[in-house]
Amino acid sequence: MAERIWIIGASDGIGRELALAYAREGADLILSARGRDKLAEVAAEAGEAEILPLDVADRASIEAAAAAIAAGGKLDRIVHLAALYDPGRIADLDPEKAAQLVTVNLTGSFHIAQVGPRLLRKHGQLALCGSVAGYVGLPQGQIYSATKAGVINLAESLRAERPDVDVRLICPGFVDTRMTRRNRFRMPAIMPADKAAAAIMKGLAGKQFEIHFPHRLTRTLKLIRALPYAASLRLTRRLSRDGD
Ligand SMILES: NC(=O)c1ccc[n+]([C@@H]2O[C@H](COP(=O)([O-])OP(=O)(O)OC[C@H]3O[C@@H](n4cnc5c(N)ncnc54)[C@H](OP(=O)(O)O)[C@@H]3O)[C@@H](O)[C@H]2O)c1
C-alpha cells in the first residue's frame, strides 16, 4: 500500500523536491505551507496530492489541518521543513523579525512535535529539520541558528520521550534554495535541492536518528562542536574577524 506522507514546507526548496521525489515513488501526499497557489503547482507536478495550507506560527491552522488528515486515516510519515531565514549580527537584528523567526522555526516545530504523533500509525515517522547552523554558534548567524539549535534539542527530547514514534532529525548543510540565494558569502559544499531531497529520503528510509549532509561539511562542524570552548571559541572568533 502507498505510504501516506505529510510534508510541511512543501511549496518550495527542499520540501518541494522531497514531495516530487516521494510522488515518483507512488506516495499518497499531503502538502502544507502558507501559500496555496504554490502548493497547488507542486501538487499538479506531483500528479496527485492533497493540499492543506497552514501557517506553523498559527496553532489553530495546524489543528484544522490535523483534523482533516485524521479524517482520512493514519500517516506513515511527517516531514516538517517549514522555516524562515534572516540571519545577521546580533547587534543588527530587527527584534520583531527575530521574534517571528523564533515563532515560526522553533515554536512551529514544537507545535508539529506535539500534534504530529497522534496522526501517525504506531512507530510512524516524525522528522524535524535542524541545520548545521545549529551545531555551534557562528558569527552573523543569529537568530536563525539559535532556532535551529533549539530544534535539534527538541528532536532529541522527543526521541527520548516517544519510543512509539520514529523521531528523526534532518541537518542539511548549504542547499541552493531561495533561502540561501540571498547569502553574500561563499557557501562551502553547497548542493542542489533535488540532491538534498534524495539524501533526506535515503536517510529517512534508513535507521540513523540524524540525517546530515554533505559529510565533509557536517563532520568538520561536529568536530568544532566537540572541542573545548577554549579551542572552539578561538576558531569562531577568527571567523568573525575574517568577516570584518
Ligand atoms: N537551504 C539551506 O541551505 C538549508 C540549510 C540547512 C537547513 N535548512 C532547512 O531546511 C528546511 C527547508 O529549507 P529551504 O531552503 O527548502 O527553504 P525555502 O525554499 O525557503 O522553503 C521553505 C518552505 O517553508 C514554507 N514556510 C515558511 N514559513 C512557513 C510558515 N510560517 N508556515 C508554513 N510553511 C512555511 C515555505 O512556503 P510559504 O512561504 O508559502 O509558507 C516553503 O514551502 C528549513 O527548515 C531550513 O531551515 C535549509
Image (spheres, grey):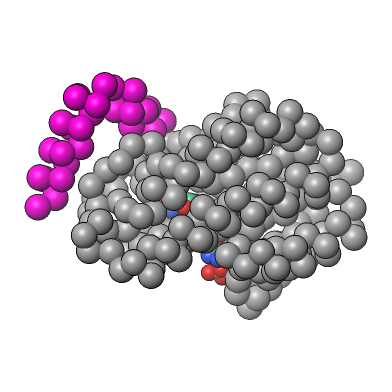
Figure check: 108 above or below 134 = below
Q: Nearer the viewer, residue 206 or 100?
A: 100
**Residue displayed at 51% across by 61% down:** 103
The residues colored magenta run 215-244
**Residue displayed at 44% across by 50% down:** 147
**Residue displayed at 13% across by 38% down:** 238
**Residue 160 visible here:** yes
Q: Position of residue 69 (x, y in %)?
A: 82, 59
Q: Position of residue 72 (x, y in %)?
A: 89, 58
**Residue 47 visible here:** no
**Horizontal side of residue 5 vs 132, given as left or right:** right
**Residue 32 is one of the magenta-drawn residues:** no
**Horizontal side of residue 236 vs 97, given as left or right:** left
Q: Nearer the viewer, residue 49 or 57?
A: 57
Q: Position of residue 34 (x, y in %)?
A: 60, 71
Q: How many numbered dots are placed on residues in this image?
A: 0
**Residue 242 is one of the magenta-drawn residues:** yes
**Residue displayed at 43% across by 42% down:** 149
The quarter of the image holding the N terminus is top right
Quadrant in the rendering for residue 30: bottom right
